[in-house]
Image (tube, rainbow, N blue to C red):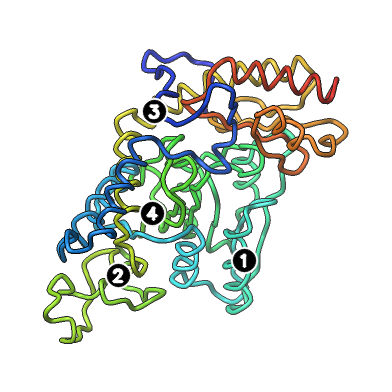
Amino acid sequence: MINTKIANANQIANQRHLFDMPDDIAYLNCAYMGPLMKTSVRAAEIGIQYKVQPWTYGGSDFFTYTEQLRELAAKLVNTDSDNIALVPSASYGIQIAANALPIDKGGEILIIKDQFPSHVYPWREKAKACGGKIVTAERPDNGDWTASVLKSISPRTEILALPATHWADGGYLDLETIGKAARDIGAKLALDLTQSLGALPFDIAVVRPDFMVAAGYKWLLGPYTLGYLYIAPQWQSGAPLEHNWMNRKGSEDFSRLVDYQDEFQPGARRFDMGEKSNPAQVLAACAALDQILDWGIANISDTLGARNSRVADHARQLGFLVTEDEYRSPHYIGLAYKDGVPKGLAEKLAENNIFLSVRGNSVRVTPHLYNTEADIERLFDALHYVTSRP
């Protein structure tokens, strides 16, 4: 379990100076879209300049920068860069997993209640095509998603398609425990960590998933349409979604591209998306991952967790329903109203430069290192003013 109340000597000082974020903006919505840091913007400008003057972008640059990005992404999850594919979205990676993982007639694919659609539709199609069945772990009354998932595993479970953090309200899934339970029955594990990677530690060697994907534009603070897909070595010989020229062996030699090859680039590279070498995107993403690795994901998690635990305590005192800290991912808070979220709440808050999301019956509050105590105070003042009482 996670204990977000424990103070850590490695908590990170406020980093707002690294972002282009005016003092009168309280942006508490990283789960919606993480802002680019100034370093990423400068890196993107360098990449754009390559397109302005394309004679400065050499043939080797198509591969050099993407390999740098691949190495950084591998460090995030403690794996070898050969196991990482560069993809445009989480759904792209999930489709690769759904294509690769077998399921028998009558076999079950386990998801959780109200899972994000991109991590549901491919599995529904998979089950339909193979005569399988989707099983849904129900929302637990006490917030313990891990127990709900474990209870839902049966001898017929063949694939567990799960997140680490529920996208709507931050509910936490203990993937180490779940991963072991999956292996014990021979089931496969396919993870979408879009709402956790970069803010919640994750170790491939510990959880041992078959596939793991994360879009890079949220907690990884990168550009849109760029994500990272881990593929376990035993699945790397499968068919990619697309057959583009860069994924074939020897494509670094532009003079021999029409010497068509049956062999692919090594490891997970065969699954890379086409036109992956967009220099503005790749350089911006490299700058973001560099900074995240420098901060340390465990330190980010501790820092956000300590603050959010105080926010949760305050919210409970005001009458909001908040999942207990041990069942909530430390970087996330869902403030639930007993009688439903007041109509137009997010829009009214935005009029006061306070930005967050409403998901279901919860106000989703997802700050990052750029947020200050003043941002949190403004949020609660505004909630009290707009709604009087939750």
Residue toward you, 188 or 314: 314
Q: Earlier in the sequence, mark 1 or mark 3?
A: 3
Residue named by callout 4: 228
Classed neighbour count for the residue bearing mark 1: other residues with Cα under 10 Å, few (<14), some (14–19), many (≥20): some
Q: In this view, does 336 lie to the left or right of 228?
A: right
* Disc 3 secondary structure class: helix
* C-alpha separation, residue under disc 2 versus residue under disc 3: 35 Å
Amino acid type indicated by mark 3? Leu
Earlier residue among tags 2 and 4: 4
Would you say 193 lies left or right of 284 here?
Answer: right
Disc on the earlier residue, 3 or 4: 3
Q: How many marks?
A: 4
Q: What residue type is labelled 1?
A: Tyr
Label 2: how many Cα within 10 Å (few below 14, some 14–19, many 20+): many
Type of the residue with mark 4 = Tyr
Q: Are marks 2 and 4 in contact (CB under 8 Å)?
A: no
Discs 1/4, front: 4
Q: x, y (%) of residue 118?
A: 58, 60
Badge 2 element: helix
